[in-house]
Image: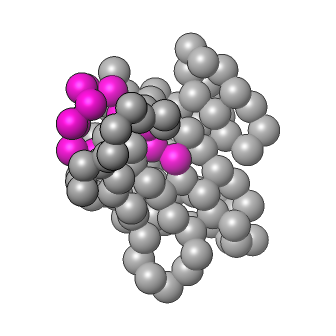
Amino acid sequence: LFRLDSRQSDGYLHFYEDGDTSAIGVLYNADASRGHQQILYAINPHGYEYWLPVPEVIPSAFTQLADHERFDPKGLKGGTFKWQDGYLILPPMSCGLWARG
């Protein structure tokens, strides 16, 4: 999903932000033009918890693979980031990586 053999479609990347902070998320293969697999990466560079709006993302469809301290290609077993009412809750000074499919 990162190394494409041709130019990506216009909807391949979808960015999540609210414009008030530099916290951001990006969904790769958002338009499913490369099959059903998707990658979500989110980062919060701030010293406070941040609720990132991700209204189109279905949390149960994704597995968290990494955070700012750990990586497990089979999925993190505990201490994963929380989701609530269309928001991904990012701890201070953190990042996370999720996979679908």
Compared with 48, 38 (above or below) is: above
Residue furthest out toward the front: 6
Residue in the picture at 34% in, 38% down: 6
Position of residue 45 in the picture relative to residue 17 (left or right): right
Q: Does the magenta stretch include residue 48?
A: no
Dominant secondary structure (helix, strand or loop) of the stretch shown in magenta: loop
Residue 72 is situated, as x and y percent measured from the top left of the image, at: 66, 20
| Residue nearest the viewer, comparing 8 with 70 | 8
Residue in the picture at 64% in, 50% down: 95
Residue 7 is situated, as x and y percent measured from the top left of the image, at: 33, 46
The quarter in which the N terminus is drawn is top left
User: Number of callouts in the render?
Assistant: 0
Residue 12 visible in the shown view? yes
Q: Is residue 34 magenta?
A: yes
Residue in the picture at 21% in, 36% down: 33
Asked where in the image residue 66 lies, by quadrant, the reply is top right
The quarter in which the C terminus is drawn is top left
Residue in the picture at 58% in, 75% down: 22
Compared with 3, 20 (above or below) is: below
Compared with 100, 43 (above or below) is: below
Compared with 65, 86 (above or below) is: below
Residue furthest out toward the right: 69
Start-end of magenta stretch: 30-41
Asked where in the image residue 81 lies, by quadrant, the reply is top right
